[in-house]
Amino acid sequence: MTHILVPPTETPPAEGSTAEAHQERADGGMWEHPGWWAWTIVIGAALVAGYFVARIWGL
């Protein structure tokens, strides 16, 4: 028995399937959670500023 070849862009037919193929949402990668990155930068900047404040007070 031969199988029907389906192009890679199409969903193969299935018995009893009535659903249509749908496009999946693109992965946001590192931009999926921009708030996390913003807080990471703010905390890093506060640590660097704190280092210099501590150096000034230590004089």
Image (cartoon, rainbow, N blue to C red):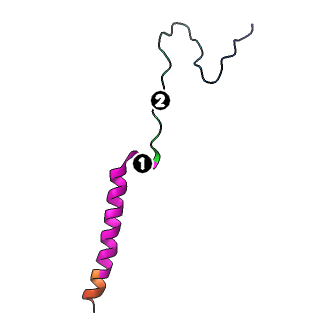
Report the residue marked by disc 1. 31
Q: Position of residue 33 (x, y in %)?
A: 37, 47
Distance, label 2 to label 1, CA atoms, is 17 Å
Q: Quadrant of residue 11?
A: top right
Q: Position of residue 25 (x, y in %)?
A: 45, 33
Which quarter of the rendering shows the N terminus? top right
Report the residue marked by disc 2. 24
Secondary-structure class at tag 1? helix
Q: Is residue 9 above or below residue 43?
A: above
Secondary-structure class at tag 2? loop
**Magenta region, residue range:** 30-52
Q: Position of residue 29 (x, y in %)?
A: 47, 46
Q: Is residue 5 above or below residue 27?
A: above
Q: Is residue 54 above or below residue 48?
A: below
Q: Amino acid at mark 2?
A: Glu
Other residues around mark 2 within 10 Å, as few (<14) / some (14–19) / many (≥20): few
Q: Is residue 20 left or right of residue 6?
A: left
Decide whether residue 40 is among the magenta residues.
yes
